[in-house]
Image: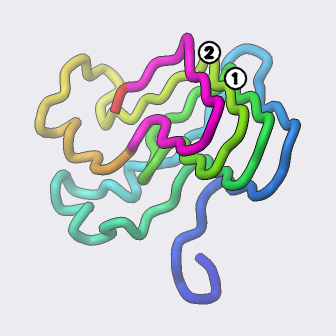
Amino acid sequence: RDEKGDDLNQMEFKSFSNVTFTSNGKGTLNGQGEKWWGIPFVGYLEHGKDRPIVFRCDDCSDILFENIIIEKAPRFSFFAENILNLEIRYCEVNNRRDPNADTHNDYELSAFNTDGFDISGKNVWVHDSSVWN
């Protein structure tokens, strides 16, 4: 938490360029969303939007994000604003409550507002990636 008591994002980057986020194989960013989701349909009432984003970058350019799994995001998985030249490839977003789930039942839907890739900007290319949200 910051000095105001607000929750900080798990990884946050501002105003940088020419950066590659990658992994040899598939690296995992685990947001530990279960702690934030809480009791199905009640956890959201408790925390609302006051939950951290797993990966956030703003006002950045020439970014490559590849070979990364983001799982169990408390809120947004990947959030980028005012981005120029972003490529996301060979990534997975998995926000299942039950790791064996293959349908979006009520239990799975209670992991509220865990957007996969939430991006605004120019020259954005997301490919060869999957999202379970």
> Residue 66: which disc?
1
Asked if the residues shown at circle 2 and circle 1 are in contact, with their CB atoms under 8 angstroms apart, the answer is: yes
Residue 68 falls left or right of residue 46: right
* Identity of the residue drawn at 40% across and 56% down: 35
The quarter in which the C terminus is drawn is top left
Question: Along the line of sight, which residue is nearer the eye, 86 or 104?
Answer: 86
Which is the main secondary structure of the residues drawn in magenta?
strand
* Identity of the residue drawn at 78% across and 42% down: 61
* Identity of the residue drawn at 22% across and 36% down: 108
The quarter in which the N terminus is drawn is bottom right
- For mark 2, does the 10 Å Cα neighbourhood hold few (<14), some (14 to 19), or many (20 or more) residues? some
Residue type indicated by callout 2: Tyr
Name, please, the residue furthest toward the top.
128
Picture quarter containing residue 37? bottom left
Tell me: residue 18, above or below residue 90.
below
Question: According to the image, label 2 marks what residue?
Answer: 90
* Identity of the residue drawn at 76% across and 34% down: 63
Instruction: Magenta stretch: give its range.
Output: 115-131
Q: Is residue 50 magenta?
A: no
Residue 18 falls left or right of residue 108: right
